[in-house]
Amino acid sequence: MISRPPRPREKGIPEATVARLPVYLRALQVLQDRGTATVSSEALAGAAGVNSAKLRKDLSHLGSYGTRGVGYEVEYLIYQISRELGLTQDWSVAIVGIGNLGRALANYGGFGTRGFRIAALLDADPEVVGRTVASLEVRHIDSLEEVVHSKGVSIGVIATPAGSAQGVASRFVEAGVTSILNFAPVVLNVPDGVDVRKVDLSIELQILAFHAQRRADGDGREAERVGLEMT
Amino acid sequence: MISRPPRPREKGIPEATVARLPVYLRALQVLQDRGTATVSSEALAGAAGVNSAKLRKDLSHLGSYGTRGVGYEVEYLIYQISRELGLTQDWSVAIVGIGNLGRALANYGGFGTRGFRIAALLDADPEVVGRTVASLEVRHIDSLEEVVHSKGVSIGVIATPAGSAQGVASRFVEAGVTSILNFAPVVLNVPDGVDVRKVDLSIELQILAFHAQRRADGDGREAERVGLEMT
DNA sequence: CCCACTTTGTGCGTGCTTTCACAAGCACGT
DNA sequence: ACGTGCTTGTGAAAGCACGCACAAAGTGGG
Ligand SMILES: NC(=O)c1ccc[n+]([C@@H]2O[C@H](COP(=O)([O-])OP(=O)(O)OC[C@H]3O[C@@H](n4cnc5c(N)ncnc54)[C@H](O)[C@@H]3O)[C@@H](O)[C@H]2O)c1
Ligand SMILES: NC(=O)c1ccc[n+]([C@@H]2O[C@H](COP(=O)([O-])OP(=O)(O)OC[C@H]3O[C@@H](n4cnc5c(N)ncnc54)[C@H](O)[C@@H]3O)[C@@H](O)[C@H]2O)c1
């Protein structure tokens, strides 16, 4: 509050930047696998599908990790972004609702880049409970609290039907989980301090439909503006 | 890809608004199923998890469909939003990559709210081609162009491994598909005029991890700011 | 040691988004 | 017809995000 800390620009990173860091990280890992040692903002921005000025500004929020005239050292930047995102530690994930989608998620090998470990699968259907999916035995939903506690679950994934999602979310919160990824098409109600993100297929399709219709409507007229997204 | 037109900024609904309309629509349908005839911006905003002023401003972009002192008529608003989003017409969807995820998508009954019809499933694996998934026979990827044409596919869904995604996207574009939903963890390169949206599980997890870490870091100190998302 | 060249980090203008606050509009009871 | 009460629709303000353009900083050659 009084003096100026030496270096750590650990203030707030803009939300928009946070959402892009994983994209940069992935592009960097591809470069690393290819044996590239350093990369310019221009090249990395190209690989990530963003403007180079934006990339530089994003990275500047983490600190000054580039070398003028040269670029960024790939390995070092990977480390810095990983650290900033919290990927240097392990995160335990529990998936609730082992239906079509839940099974796909459980079987998804490259789950996250690194750092994410599927610790438990839960379901309510007696038919499903007890079965083994992706080398894990499906536990009954009643044991959610116990599982969260014993496995140290910090991220909850909800892949149940819409009707059950709020109930599951509340139980997650009650059990102390403060990060939730929701695939069910409902708005979850959670207390402050709990972070919910949603993945919603049908919303994405509807947004695509909107743009497609707009394009078709104004066709023949002038060049339509398209909300080009390639984040 | 090089020149940037002076942006023929026509009239238009803000992108941020478009992304929320599907959420409002879903909330309205729940209300309709419950027999509710009219709803105030306050109540609808609550159900959609947004600020009521934002909701009103969003809806004002579509026109003046509310009645002061009363609220919005649920059925009429559903119609207006549906029309705006292009859901009054049918959209033909093709899914490429019938693996874990592709199968889950194909089997997903409530695909969109309405208006979206899965017209074709495509894969490259001879083991998968010919099998029936969700009442559809899986076609070989080589017939993509033919299928797009004969089924009038306007939206392409990519659920192949990352390495194949760009190739599939290019073929979609070549075949005339201008709306693509991509589940593979790569940045797709497409020409202007093609709309790509992505769904990326691991990015979502990484964003959750970032917030979780930030919360943990500053714990005990002052009240942490949490990016509370409950869209 | 200096100069030419490259690329970062950022100040700044612009435009989009959110939120507040309130006048205007409509229903309903009297 | 008119007042009361409620809710919409929207100016205006504040906050963010984006991208340009350039000074600063480093590299390498002579
Ligand atoms: N399948 C998809 O491609 C897809 C796409 C987008 C969204 N979604 C959404 O994801 C969710 C799951 O979809 P799905 O296709 O896997 O459905 P599903 O019916 O195949 O699976 C749901 C699973 O949840 C279990 N379940 C139900 N209530 C539960 C509870 N209270 N506690 C624990 N488990 C419970 C069921 O036993 C079942 O195994 C749905 O909300 C759906 O809308 C699915
Ligand atoms: N499974 C998940 O939960 C999940 C989650 C997030 C992201 N993803 C991503 O979604 C994609 C698919 O995941 P998955 O788990 O279903 O993988 P998968 O390996 O089970 O399925 C991929 C399918 O694509 C087919 N394929 C490969 N190349 C093809 C080509 N050129 N043309 C047509 N088909 C081709 C394969 O034959 C296979 O059937 C991957 O990119 C993955 O990273 C999956």
Image (cartoon, coloured by chain):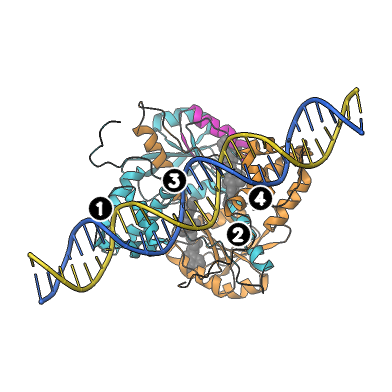
Chain colours: A cyan, B orange, C yellow, D blue
Which one is in front in this view, the residue at disc 3 or the one at disc 1? 3
Residue at mark 2 to residue at mark 4: CA–CA distance: 17 Å
Does mark 4's beta carbon lie closer than 8 Å to ligand 1? yes
Residue B143: give x, y in percent of width and height. 58, 74
Viewer can see residue B161: yes
Nearest to N terminus: mark 3 or mark 2: 3
Residue A110: give x, y in percent of width and height. 40, 52
Residue at mark 4 to residue at mark 3: CA–CA distance: 31 Å
Which one is in front in this view, the residue at disc 2 or the one at disc 4? 2
Nearest to N terminus: mark 2 or mark 1: 1
Which quarter of the rendered picture does the N terminus of chain A lie within? top left
Q: Secondary structure at mark 2?
A: helix
Chain letter belonging to callout 2: A
Residue B221: give x, y in percent of width and height. 35, 27
| Amino acid type, mark 2 | Leu
Residue A208, which numbered label?
A: 2
Location of mark 3 (residue): A15
| Amino acid type, mark 3 | Glu
Quarter of image, res B146: bottom right
| Amino acid type, mark 1 | Tyr
Magenta includes A178?
A: yes
Which residue occupies the foreground of this view, A137 or B21? B21
